[in-house]
Structure formats: C-alpha cells, structure tokens
Image (cartoon, grey):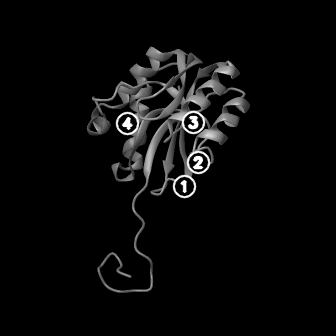
Amino acid sequence: MLGTSGEKNGNSAPKPPGFFALVYYPAVDAVSIQQLRKKYDPQVQLIQPDITIVFPVPESIGEQHLIAHIQDVLLAWRPFTIRLKGLRLSWHNYLFLLVHEGKSNLIRLHAQMYVGLLAEYHHDEVSFVPHVTLGFFSEDDRRQAALAEAERLNLDYRSILDRLFLVKVNSDRTQVILSKEFLL
C-alpha cells in the first residue's frame, strides 16, 4: 500500500475525508415515520428522521470554522413551531414528509447558513424544500406504493425547532456522529 508519503508501508491508505451536515431532529413520536423508512429509506440505519438545514459539506472546511459560522447565524434566531404534514415525490426519486408550518423560517435559515463560509456550497439551481425523507426509489412502482402507504398514515406532527445538531458523516456514509448541539 502507498502511505501519504508515497512510500510503501503496511498501513492502509488514508481514509477519504468525511462530511458535516446541520440537521434538526423533530421531537415527535416517529414510530410511523420509522416504519415507512425501514421499508423505503436506505439511510434509516444511518440517521434518525431529520430536517437537513445544511447539506453535507466536506470535513476540510474545518469543524471549528463551521461551528463559529453556525453560532454567528443562530444569534438572531429564536425557537419556532414547525408542522410536518403533506407528502411529495421529488424529482430525484425521494418521498418527502413536508414542513407545512414553519416552512418560510426554515427556508430563511437555510439561506442564511449558505452565506460567507458556506457560500460556495450553495446550489442555486435546486430550490430548498424543507422535509423529512421517508424513502428513496429507483423504481416507479415502489414510489407509488410508498406514497399510497404514507397517505393512509395521515402523518401530521408539530414540534418546536429549538435546537440544531452538527453531525459528522464518515466518507462512505455508514456512520453519523454528533459533533455539536446548538440551542436557538
């Protein structure tokens, strides 16, 4: 194997860097959500039901720089209510449980996070849709079955967004580790 110096040694190659993401875990009874996710979401074992505020950015950004940026943005924020209700099949084959109430706050928070340090990671071509992922599909027939199943559950939850979590995801996306909790 080649080590970082290019010399042969007995160690394995260095692991590629991981990612950071900023998420909110809604404080709801997620039994029905988890039942759906176990059937349809390949990331069910990776992360609990969440609303992603900052999508994965490379670890190379620097954890302390990222923490300082998040703290600066959150200085102006106070807790607010969200309501999860309504479903949507996305253009990229996901089933979303939508944020019905608090949506505009989440969109503003998301936009504020992507200034300064994170500006280069913002994707203007994709509109931010606040949601909890219920499933991912490569086959249309499974998408429709999952949507019908989710509709029968009549999912409707309220929660107070009063904290966010910076999580670190390893490079092969098999493990999520809590890095820091931020209170609003």
Q: Amino acid at mark 4?
A: His
Mark 4 lies on a secondary structure that is: helix
**Whole-Å distance between the Cαs marked 1 and 2?**
6 Å
Q: Quadrant of residue 92?
A: top left
Residue assigned mark 4:
69
Q: Residue 174: give its label.
A: 1
**Whole-Å distance between the Cαs marked 4 and 1?**
26 Å
In front of the other: 53 or 149:
149
Residue assigned mark 2:
46
Q: Amino acid at mark 3?
A: Arg
**Whole-Å distance between the Cαs marked 4 and 2?**
26 Å
Residue located 30% across and 33% down the image: 123
Residue assigned mark 3:
142
Mark 2 lies on a secondary structure that is: loop
Query: Cβ–Cβ below 8 Å for labels 1 and 2?
Result: yes
Q: Earlier in the sequence, mark 3 or mark 2?
A: 2
**Whole-Å distance between the Cαs marked 3 and 1?**
24 Å
